[in-house]
């Protein structure tokens, strides 16, 4: 087949040809390139199924092989499965098995077979575990440790060498900026505390920040057993049918059927699938009722968590009318001065709601006395909730699985130790020896400077040498000892003091980046006011112990513990922690709320949790940010690799300089030895290795503060190289909120109610947004599940619609493509023009057909374009970025949306299946350098989508962007998530990526040029140890400050916060007036 033989109007050929007519083979597009390989790709492309089709760079080496059976598997769908599974952390290979309908998956123990099955089921495949060739009894957990001794990348090899050999540890990731170490380990073999002790024993002061084994216990508590009574007599074939129906659902563990009593038992994860969803999925083939909800079983099991031992502390709330951002530092200083931790354990000020939460011991400190203290500062404080009177006793700190930190926690800030201060004092005295004359003897003060400043560095160097390694500490000890041997005491003092003080200076310089990242981690709720299911009393419970389905009371200023639905009350909720948007959102009964958001209205409300805290929106945000920090980019790896090669080379050269010249003369030996020591100092790679991670940390924090989650430095760099942006239509450029506008009967004998019954029957098992729209439209007209109709053999026709046998007749609901294939489209008659008119007007047109009778009904649903879509596309086009739209919708609907957002029709591709989108995106991807993505020109392809159908394309694109309100799988496959689905933030993300790339290039060039300059001055005799160490420390500070410039300027950020506070100045959150709980945008501007 040649390009000339292809009909360009046929969208099915998009997967095989690009716009220039170049032939592509979809099955071999492992990296998005074509079969016309580069010159260095000499290996022959193997036949499909002979070897693993792709390799994942994530995780550790695979040691498990799992065989998955997929019903009616089409080998042509392999690339779709491959692109999605390889995006999972720990999956190393996906390839066809030798047997029919079998796919083999190579993965490590960090990804279980259940996660692989759930992912496939989410995509719509009926998948089952065939066989696991290795035991998966090992249950790995991910623990988080704070390691005080991390300064730059030079410590990473030492930490790796300590932790990796430990029995039970499988994977380790290090975040230099936040000093966090993430360890995957088997808690049955080694605990998080034992890992921390191993680090502590080697000189790295460590503490467990989060123990993964406690989270594992919480996850198992989410599995419940639901009992369903089937309202019909069951036969043998029904057992298999019921099991296949329910096993296809994500989160279902086991299905048992009692044929005699017509009872179905289902063990399932209630956070993934509810009892109501199980019941609904069995309908209409098996009408059933819920005898026992698995959630109720879990609630009974977890009641004991609400009866934890209580501490002496209670939680009280103060309303402080004049509370502003400027008061926060004053509050901390005042509370520390007036109270001890035994009186006040923590306090949590929240400026928008004008509240301060206090954790205090009422027997030692009354909440009224705190209010009196604040009123001395004219803050107009009053008691809103007295925890002692309402018996709001807090749990013991030991009952929290994740450490909590409040305002009274002692700061862990680095500070100058006395020995460093004394070293600096004597170093300054030794410098005075340059005056000469009688002052020359002051150079001996340099020995005292070395005596005070060098011992901690010597201890670190000794431990490093014991591990057969050589790091910056060893270099500085060598330089200092060498200077003393040459009787250059002032030079030795310069090395000892300036290197000792460098860690403190670096910590201060990068404090803003750490603080920004830490503020995101602090969004996690500490506890929740759970309403006891038996007594009805409020019990303050650690947030991570709140079971799904719990009733939680949320008062003014309370942070919502987990995602849920309001069952009583109404108020305004501040969601800025998740979305970056300051405007509060009014919430009422039956509205959904997100964990981590805060009640800023005047009324309390009660929510019913729909997930665990670990699965809530805020926990997902925190987890994504933590993982992003630990994911190292190719540029960062290249810099570290260069430093590892560069440092031994320079040290070897310095060794020759310190030894060979002594064979010629003592004067030459003295001079060249001093030069060699200077070279050793400048060989320190700290400035070079810290320049990249601190830049990433600042950029990740800046984007996260605006509700944009970027999964690592590689994604940030790729953002700066985006050349093409591909948008999905439904739910991305449009809101994805469909409305049924038209429904007409083509056959007079079919009434409107009968058409709605057919739509309800066939669309209710589907998860597509259009399906839920049609079902809801039927419900609004009083049409429910028709009990008098019997449906069997329901099937989803990918990209076309659905079909089923209803009362012995084959019924279809779908689009024009389906009915054209069936030969029914021509039976429309006069309605054909109407359908074309609706489609050209932007509507999505569908049909109801009955085999042998033709099309019986026609309907049209519409969707609205996002308000910001036009401006975003205009900005991208003006910036030289090509914009393309892909959709499975009709050509008329696609062109209508394109016109509204300002896209030419040549950039629109319609009627595409998920695999067509995958192949189209893959055909645009160009091979790029993997070692240094920040040095590549703009050539990256970005895909923006929201649904399950977009997941394969998101996974294969250079940069995948998912909408936060879209499918969970889409967010899992993507590189970037927009938490509030605001497309305007996409422009900010691309701009931040560009700034990140430029900053990294500046830092690397500055570090290398500074070192080359010092080396050059050394060889011409114009350099001293003092200037060399000063240059090294100075460059490290400069690149650090240059990296954190990506954070919002402090003044700008505070103005944004003040603006947010200003919205509440005319609204008293303690009043019960809820008529106007939040200000309009116009009122906000006036304030």
Image: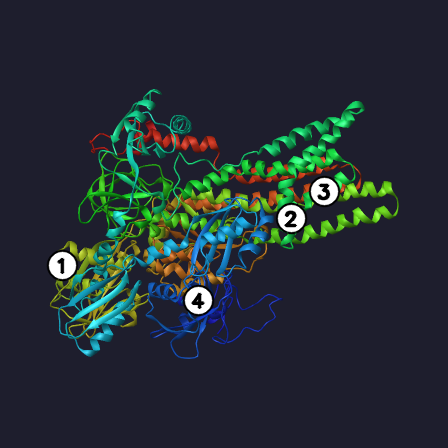
Which of the pair 610/638 is nearer the observer? 610
Mark earlier in primary sequence (2, 3):
2
Mark earlier in primary sequence (4, 2):
4
Who's the residue at 38% across and 63% down the image?
115
Is residue 1030 visible to the viewer in this orientation of the structure? no
Residue 72 position in % (x across, y down): 34, 75
Residue that mark 4 sits on: 82
Q: Secondary structure at mark 4?
A: helix
Label 2: few (<14), some (14–19) or many (≥20) C-alpha neighbours in 10 Å: some
Residues at marks 2 and 1, CA–CA distance in whole angstroms? 79 Å
Q: Secondary structure at mark 2?
A: helix
Residue that mark 1 sits on: 783
Residue that mark 3 sits on: 479
Which of the pair 642/365 is nearer the observer? 365
Residues at marks 4 and 3, CA–CA distance in whole angstroms? 54 Å
Is residue 844 visible to the viewer in this orientation of the structure? yes
Residue 446 position in % (x across, y down): 71, 32
Please identify the quarter of the rendering in which residue 1067 is found.
Answer: top left
Question: Residue 941, relative to residue 517: is it above or below?
Answer: below
Tally of numbered tags: 4
């Amino acid at each position: 087949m040649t390009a000339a033989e292809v009909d360009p109007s046929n969208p099915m050929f998009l997967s095989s040809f690009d716009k220039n007519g170049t032939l592509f083979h979809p099955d071999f597009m492992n990296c998005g390139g074509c079969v016309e390989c580069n010159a260095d790709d000499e290996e022959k492309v193997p036949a499909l199924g002979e070897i693993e089709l792709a390799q994942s760079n994530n995780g550790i080496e695979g040691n498990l092989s799992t065989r998955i059976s997929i019903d009616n598997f089409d080998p042509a769908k392999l690339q779709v499965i491959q692109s999605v599974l390889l995006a999972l952390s720990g999956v190393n290979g996906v390839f066809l098995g030798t047997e029919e309908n079998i796919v083999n998956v190579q993965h490590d123990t960090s990804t279980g077979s259940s996660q692989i099955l759930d992912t496939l089921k989410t995509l719509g495949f009926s998948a089952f575990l065939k066989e696991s060739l290795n035991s998966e009894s090992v249950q790995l957990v991910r623990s988080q440790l704070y390691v005080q001794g991390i300064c730059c990348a030079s410590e990473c090899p030492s930490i790796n060498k300590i932790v990796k050999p430990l029995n039970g540890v499988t994977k380790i990731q290090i975040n230099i900026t936040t000093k966090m170490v993430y360890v995957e380990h088997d808690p049955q073999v080694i605990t998080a505390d034992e890992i921390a002790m191993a680090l502590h024993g080697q000189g790295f002061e460590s503490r467990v920040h989060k123990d993964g084994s406690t989270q594992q216990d919480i996850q198992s508590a989410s599995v419940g057993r639901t009992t369903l009574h089937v309202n019909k007599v069951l036969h043998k074939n029904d057992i298999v049918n019921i099991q296949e129906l329910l096993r296809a659902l994500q989160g279902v563990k086991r299905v048992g059927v009692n044929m005699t009593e017509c009872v179905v038992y289902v063990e399932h994860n209630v956070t993934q699938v509810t009892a109501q969803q199980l019941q609904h999925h069995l309908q209409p083939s098996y009408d059933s009722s819920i005898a026992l909800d698995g959630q109720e079983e879990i609630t009974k099991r977890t009641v004991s968590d609400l009866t934890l031992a209580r501490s002496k502390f209670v939680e009280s709330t103060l309303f402080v009318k004049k509370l502003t951002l400027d008061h926060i530092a004053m509050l901390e200083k005042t509370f520390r001065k007036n109270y001890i931790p035994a009186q006040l354990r923590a306090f949590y000020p929240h400026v928008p709601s004008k509240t301060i939460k206090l954790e205090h011991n009422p027997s030692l400190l009354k909440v009224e006395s705190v209010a009196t203290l604040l009123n001395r500062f004219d803050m107009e404080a009053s008691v809103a909730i007295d925890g002692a009177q309402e018996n709001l006793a807090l749990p013991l700190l030991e009952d929290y699985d994740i450490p909590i930190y409040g305002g009274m926690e002692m700061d862990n800030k680095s500070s100058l130790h006395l020995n460093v201060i004394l070293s600096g004092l004597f170093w300054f005295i030794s410098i005075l020896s340059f005056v000469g004359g009688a002052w020359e003897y002051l150079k001996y003060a340099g020995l005292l400077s070395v005596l005070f400043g060098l011992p901690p560095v010597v201890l670190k160097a000794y431990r490093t040498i014991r591990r057969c390694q050589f790091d910056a500490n060893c270099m500085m000890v060598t330089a200092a000892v060498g200077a003393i041997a040459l009787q250059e005491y002032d030079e030795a003092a310069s090395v000892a003091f300036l290197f000792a003080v460098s860690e403190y200076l670096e910590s201060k310089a990068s404090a803003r980046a750490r603080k920004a990242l830490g503020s995101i981690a602090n969004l996690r709720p500490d506890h929740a006011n759970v309403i006891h299911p038996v007594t009805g009393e409020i019990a303050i419970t650690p947030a991570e112990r709140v079971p799904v389905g719990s009733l939680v009371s949320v008062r003014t200023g309370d942070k919502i513990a987990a995602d849920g639905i309001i069952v009583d009350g109404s108020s305004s909720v501040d969601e800025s922690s998740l979305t970056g948007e300051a405007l509060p959102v009014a919430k009422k009964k039956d509205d959904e709320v997100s964990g981590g958001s805060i009640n800023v209205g005047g009324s309390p409300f009660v929510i019913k949790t729909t997930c665990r805290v670990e699965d809530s929106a805020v926990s997902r945000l925190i987890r994504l940010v933590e993982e992003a920090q630990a994911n190292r980019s190719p540029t960062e790896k290249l810099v570290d690799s260069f430093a590892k090669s560069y440092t031994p080379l320079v040290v070897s050269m310095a060794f020759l300089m310190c030894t060979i010249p002594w064979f010629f003369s003592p004067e030459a030996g003295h001079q060249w030895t001093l030069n060699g020591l200077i070279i050793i100092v400048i060989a320190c790679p700290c400035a070079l290795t810290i320049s990249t991670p601190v830049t990433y940390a600042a950029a990740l924090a800046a984007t996260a503060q605006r509700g944009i989650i970027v999964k690592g430095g590689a994604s940030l760099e790729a953002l700066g190289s985006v050349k093409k942006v591909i948008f999905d239509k439904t739910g991305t450029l449009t809101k994805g909120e469909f409305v049924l506008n038209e429904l007409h009967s083509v056959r007079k004998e079919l009434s409107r109610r009968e058409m709605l019954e057919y739509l309800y029957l066939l669309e209710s098992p589907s998860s597509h947004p259009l399906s839920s729209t049609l079902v809801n439209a039927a419900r609004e007209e009083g049409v429910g599940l028709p009990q008098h109709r019997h449906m069997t053999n329901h099937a989803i026709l990918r990209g076309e619609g659905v079909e089923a046998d209803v009362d012995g007749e084959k019924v279809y609901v779908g689009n024009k493509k389906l009915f054209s294939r069936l030969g029914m489209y021509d039976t429309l008659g006069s309605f054909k023009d109407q359908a074309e008119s609706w489609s050209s007007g932007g509507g999505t047109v569908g049909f109801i057909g009955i085999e042998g009778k033709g099309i019986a009904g026609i309907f049209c649903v519409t969707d609205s374009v996002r308000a910001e879509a036009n401006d975003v596309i205009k900005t991208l086009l003006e910036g030289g970025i090509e914009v393309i739209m892909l959709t499975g919708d009709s050509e008329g609907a696609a062109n209508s949306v394109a016109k509204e957002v300002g896209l030419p029709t040549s950039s629109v591709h319609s009627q595409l299946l998920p695999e067509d989108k995958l192949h189209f995106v893959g055909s645009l991807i160009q091979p790029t350098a993997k070692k240094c993505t920040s040095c590549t020109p703009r050539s990256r392809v970005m895909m923006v989508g929201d649904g399950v159908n977009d997941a394969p394309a998101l996974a294969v694109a250079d940069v995948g962007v998912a909408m936060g309100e879209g499918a969970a799988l889409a967010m899992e496959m993507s590189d970037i998530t927009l938490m509030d689905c605001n497309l305007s933030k996409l422009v900010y993300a691309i701009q931040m990526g560009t700034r990140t790339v430029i900053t990294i290039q500046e830092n690397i060039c500055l570090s290398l040029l500074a070192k080359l300059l010092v080396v050059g001055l050394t060889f011409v005799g114009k350099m001293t140890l003092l200037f060399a160490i000063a240059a090294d420390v100075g460059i490290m500070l400069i690149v650090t400050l240059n990296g954190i410039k990506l954070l919002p300027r402090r003044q700008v950020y505070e103005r944004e916060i003040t603006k947010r506070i200003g919205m509440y100045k005319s609204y008293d959150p303690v009043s019960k007036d809820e008529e106007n709980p939040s200000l309009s945008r116009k009122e906000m501007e006036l304030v």
